[in-house]
Structures are given as structure tokens and as C-alpha cells.
């Protein structure tokens, strides 16, 4: 099944610059419908009100981290199948293991490049 | 010979043992009280103990004087605050600069849309490189926040030391990157929020992919 490039993508990061960078990189690979949230709490609220095809979230945010958001999404009956990619500076082994156990679909370490973002999205969503 | 310990001294020692810190005045008081409890005939051992206690008292006074000369109040109130403010400025300036760079890159990207395919591809590739390189701002901000947390720990330790020595200092907690940190933030028991690692400390994307696939 081909990937619907018109799908809504939610990007979550407490650094506005990073939101802007990810949004622009997504635009370059053909995804224009991108919403932003500045922490896990705001992201979860948006997930309740709109249909998204993918969440791309930072880890290190307060009050709700990207990891906490992932756990909450996986525990939600309506959202538990949501494709979820963590994009984070957290590069310790225990972080990757914890994220995988919590049900993350893929894990990108910062700093990253456009090719890595595209490859990981394809690994989660299928080729596009 | 057997010594007797004054009841009040015993109570003072017990109270001190249960506390986390011992102030200079309390320590000197205990030493003085111990000296006063040495009743009865004074022999060579008593004199040796007395001398050692006197030396301990002198050492405490000397240490207090040395630390006072270091001006710990200046370190916590001036130098650490100044360092945190400077780090705040670094974060603010890099954020502003990155924003301007992204403004320019987005303009180039829009113009590229009006060019022929070959030139558009060249400009878009350059713009992508700019976006990728702009990652630095996030990483830099997180690293600076780590440094500020370290400064806060040093400040807290100095405060504890100064209070133990009988002084009183003001608290001055600072953060960076527009995120003022509370003591609760510093002590937040989240062992999975470690931030960027130094080269050799963390694992790279290839290692993460291999680990991810193996789980």
C-alpha cells in the first residue's frame, strides 16, 4: 500500500527551531500537512482532536517527555496503533531499550540528516 | 583513669550525630566542652589528647578563615550567576541566528520552486544541508542546560558549606535557554533524560539501528 503524502503528521519538540527544521525537511520530501506541539501534554491533546498518520517526537521535554507521550499513546485504545518515531539527543543504550519496550516504531538520534529521517519514515510507513 | 562526660555534652553530641551538617560554632563548642570534662589528675595521655583537641580547634578556625577568604558568597552570588547569564545569552543569540538562517533558507527554497528542475534541485540540496546543519542549535542548548545544572550543584554545595561555617548566603538559582530551572528540576529522578552525550559516551545511529533490530 502506498503512503498517503497528504496525511497529517504531528511533530513534537520544545525547541521551536527544531520544529521548524523538521517541518521543512518533511516539506522537502513531500509532506505538507504538519502540525506542531511543544510538549507531550499538548501533543496528546492534539491527538485527541484530529487524525494523524505519524507522530515524530523529541524525548527531552517537560512536563511530559516524548517517552511519556509514547507510553500514553500506546495505552490509549484509539491511538495505540499510531506510528511513532522518537527523534532525540538521548543516545544511551538504556534509552533505546526503554523506547523499544514501550512500543516506539523507530528511533533517530540527533543531530540527524534528511536522508536518515526519510529512511526511518519509510521503514515505519512503507516506501514513498 | 576513667573520665566522666557531662550530661549536657552527651546530649549535644547525640544531637549533632543525628544532624546532616555540623556548624563551626557547634564543633568548637563540643571541642571546648570535651576539654572542660577532663577532670582529675592530668597525665601525659591527657596532655596529648588536650593538644590534639586544641589543634583540631585551631584547624577548624583556620579552615573557616581560608574559606572566608575565598569569598564563597561572591562565587555563588556573582560568578555563578554571571556564568549562567552568559550561557543564557549564548543560547539566545544562537537561537536568533538560527532563526535568521532558516528565514533565508526558506526564501531560497521558495525561489527554487520557480526555477528549472536542474537549478531547483541544486538549491533544494543546499537548503537541505542548511536545515540539517541547523540541528546544532538544539544540541547546543541541551549541552548548555547540562552545564548550568552543574553550576547549580556547585552553588548548592557551596551554600551548604558556607551555612555549616556559620555564614548566611542568599540563594541564586539560574537557568539557560529561556528555561529557568527549579531545584525540583535538578533533582527530578528521571534517569532516562540525560541529554546529548560526549563523543564516545553515547551510541551512534548505526549502533542504535542494530540494537533496535535486535530487541
Image: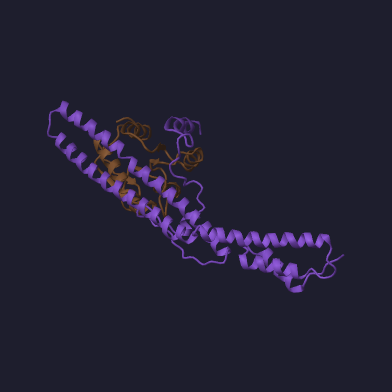
Chain colours: A brown, B purple
- Residue at left 79%, top 68%? B38
- Which image quadrant for residue B81? bottom left
Image x and y of residue B75, in percent: 46, 57
The residue most toward the bottom is B8
Q: Is residue B214 left or right of residue B123?
A: right
- Which image quadrant for residue A81? top left
- Residue at left 19%, top 37%? B109
- Residue at left 44%, top 44%? B195
Q: Could one spot residue B169 in this view of the protein?
A: yes
Image x and y of residue A76, in percent: 43, 50
Q: In the figure, B60 relative to B207: above or below?
A: below
- Residue at left 17%, top 40%? B107
Q: Is residue B7 left or right of residue A106?
A: right
Image x and y of residue B145, in percent: 41, 49
Frontmost residue, A34 versus B98: B98
Q: Quadrant of the N terminus of chain B?
A: bottom right
Q: In the figure, B38 relative to A105: above or below?
A: below
Frontmost residue, A17 versus B64: B64
Frontmost residue, A88 versus B170: B170
Frontmost residue, B63 versus A78: B63
- Which image quadrant for residue B8? bottom right
Amino acid at each position: 500500500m502506498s503512503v498517503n503524502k497528504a496525511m497529517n503528521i504531528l511533530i513534537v519538540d520544545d525547541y521551536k527551531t527544531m520544529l521548524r527544521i523538521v517541518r521543512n525537511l518533511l516539506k522537502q520530501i513531500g509532506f505538507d500537512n504538519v502540525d506542531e506541539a511543544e510538549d507531550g501534554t499538548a501533543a496528546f491533546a492534539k491527538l485527541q482532536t484530529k487524525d494523524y498518520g505519524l507522530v515524530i517526537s523529541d524525548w527531552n521535554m517537560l512536563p511530559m517527555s516524548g517517552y511519556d507521550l509514547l507510553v500514553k499513546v500506546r495505552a490509549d485504545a484509539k491511538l495505540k496503533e499510531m506510528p511513532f518515531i522518537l527523534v532525540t539527543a538521548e543516545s544511551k543504550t538504556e534509552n533505546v531499550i526503554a523506547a523499544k519496550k514501550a512500543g516506539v516504531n523507530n528511533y533517530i538520534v540527533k543531530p540527524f540528516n534528511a536522508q536518515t529521517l526519510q529512511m526511518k519514515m519509510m521503514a515505519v510507513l512503507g516506501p514513498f | 583513669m576513667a573520665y566522666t562526660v557531662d550530661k549536657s555534652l552527651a546530649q549535644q553530641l547525640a544531637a549533632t550525630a543525628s544532624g546532616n551538617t555540623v556548624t563551626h560554632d557547634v564543633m568548637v563548642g563540643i571541642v571546648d566542652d570535651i576539654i572542660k570534662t577532663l577532670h582529675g589528675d592530668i597525665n601525659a595521655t591527657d596532655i596529648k589528647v588536650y593538644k590534639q583537641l586544641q589543634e583540631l580547634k585551631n584547624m577548624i578556625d583556620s579552615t573557616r578563615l581560608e574559606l572566608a577568604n575565598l569569598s564563597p558568597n561572591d562565587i555563588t552570588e556573582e560568578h555563578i550567576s554571571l556564568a549562567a547569564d552568559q550561557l543564557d545569552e549564548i543560547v539566545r543569540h544562537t537561537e536568533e541566528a538560527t532563526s535568521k538562517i532558516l528565514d533565508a533558507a526558506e526564501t531560497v527554497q521558495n525561489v527554487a520552486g520557480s526555477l528549472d528542475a536542474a537549478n531547483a534541485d541544486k538549491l533544494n540540496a543546499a537548503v537541505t544541508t542548511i536545515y540539517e546543519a541547523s540541528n546544532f542549535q538544539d544540541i547546543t542548548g541541551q549541552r548548555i542546560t547540562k552545564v548550568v545544572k552543574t553550576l547549580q550543584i556547585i552553588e548548592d554545595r557551596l551554600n551548604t558549606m558556607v551555612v555549616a561555617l556559620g555564614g548566611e548566603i542568599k540563594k541564586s538559582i539560574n537557568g539557560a535557554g529561556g528555561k529557568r530551572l527549579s531545584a525540583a528540576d535538578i533533582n527530578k529522578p528521571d534517569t532516562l533524560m540525560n541529554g546529548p552525550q560526549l563523543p564516545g559516551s553515547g551510541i551512534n545511529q548505526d549502533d542504535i539501528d542494530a540494537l533496535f533490530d535486535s530487541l
